[in-house]
Image (cartoon, rainbow, N blue to C red):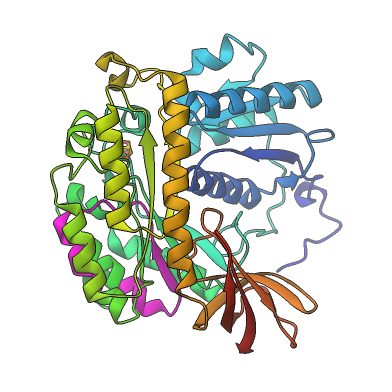
Amino acid sequence: MQTPPSSDAATAPSAPRKVSFVSLGCPKALVDSERIVTRLRAEGYELTRTHAGADLVLVNTCGFLDSAKAESLAAIGEALAENGKVVVTGCMGAEPEAITEKFPNVLAVTGPQQYESVMEAVHRAVPPPHDPFLDLVPPQGVKLTPRHYAYLKISEGCNNRCTFCIIPKLRGDLVSRPAADVLREAEKLVAAGVKELLIISQDTSAYGVDLKYAASVWRDREVRAKFLDLAAALGELGAWVRLHYVYPYPHVDEVIPLMAEGRVLPYLDIPFQHGVPSVLTRMRRPAAQEKTLQRIARWREMCPELTLRSTFIVGFPGETEEEFSALLDWLDEASLDRVGCFKYEPVKGAPANDLGDAVPEDVKEERWHRFMQRQQTISARRLKRKIGTRQQVIIDEASPGFAKGRSKADAPEIDGVVRITSRRPLRVGELATVKIDRAGAYDLHGTAVGF
Ligand code: SF4
């Protein structure tokens, strides 16, 4: 880094402007936040942890469910009360009136991925500090996740029209990044110490459809913008590669051999949402008619180590007791490892609201409990099979004698953890071999036996 000549008043750096940043919502929103933070840091803004004393508060909102909207509005209200200068961005920015009606004092509201507009709003409120000699941003950008893992967004938007979802309205149709672009970002992340890449998008297995799978040049060769080709190329980088938001389209079968060969993690996050064709059709889910149970069985034959995580919705409009019990049977047969479940919540603007036949709240509640109970037994049984095995674990937290990490079967923030006792102190981001001693309902416990 160069040092500015101290006598030159014209180029003397001014005091850094401070921005307090609130990031709400899903990993996709987190990636947007990282981009905004990277831009802020590149322009010399400083980030602070508290609203008080900041020159501006930037709130990246989530507008998916009504509960998420309420959380976003509460965060905006808090920022206004504690600071007064607030810019709002993110999914809720697609409906600015919902914010400005309640908070007419916000300085600006911009929509999802409108990086330029967010930065313009920031510049208007707090002009950037002038310091031509400083380059504050490392080449891989600024990550909000710990240094050893990072989310990598491969596309934006979605071509599906699931009836409960307004994401395509908020974010538009699928727009994929060229493969070389994704791979270059992945390379930079790995060079900066990232050990695990979490691949995200709205519909990962549809990657490249909009580009007609066009190839781009990376490391002197052509890589097609195709789910399989991108996964294989990412697998060359020497980091763990974890695939999220994959739909069970037939071509997903092709990546299972990469998992069996250890090139990408044997882990698939597939938001099934339901298991019964009649409900999936009402949800207008992609791959609603696929024979998913057969497909899962085949994947497990090809890659016995495969971990499957999913999310479900119970109490979708019109869901009968018969359909719900069929879902429980489906769950038994699918024997998934990790599962989240939501009670159906109507989202303003979603076509499912017009289906009628709403399931009463107490029935939703009762179904949610039955679902969770059934799955808990399945998850516990799947975890128990690991007792006595040795698992490679990436360390997320470490203190003398004890550490917390995740095996290849555990994604950060959504899955369980491995609690480790170790004679030698472990370091955050390191990979350790852990012998599994016991299993709880969600987590594993073990002893470090190799480093
Ligand atoms: S696949 Fe369905 S639920 Fe997912 S973003 Fe697209 S429309 Fe929404």
Q: Does residue 128 appear to the left or right of 63 in the view shown?
A: right
**Quadrant hosting residue 50:** top right
* Residue 218 seen in render: no
Q: Which one is in front, 337 or 333?
A: 333
* Residue 322 seen in render: yes
Q: Which one is in front, 255 or 104?
A: 255
**Quadrant hosting residue 85:** top right
* In the image, residue 48 above or below residue 364: below
Image quadrant, ligand 1 = top left
Q: Is residue 406 magenta?
A: no
Q: Position of residue 86 (x, y in %)?
A: 68, 26
| Image quarter of the C terminus | bottom right
Q: Position of residue 314 (x, y in %)?
A: 37, 33
Q: Position of residue 339 (x, y in %)?
A: 43, 51
Q: Is residue 238 magenta?
A: yes
Q: Position of residue 411 (x, y in %)?
A: 49, 61
Q: Does residue 98 appear to the left or right of 371 in the view shown?
A: right
Residue at 72 percent of width and 32 percent of height: 56
| Image quarter of the N terminus | bottom right
Residue segment shown in magenta: 233-256
Residue at 34 percent of width and 47 percent of height: 271
Residue at 78 percent of width and 34 percent of height: 51
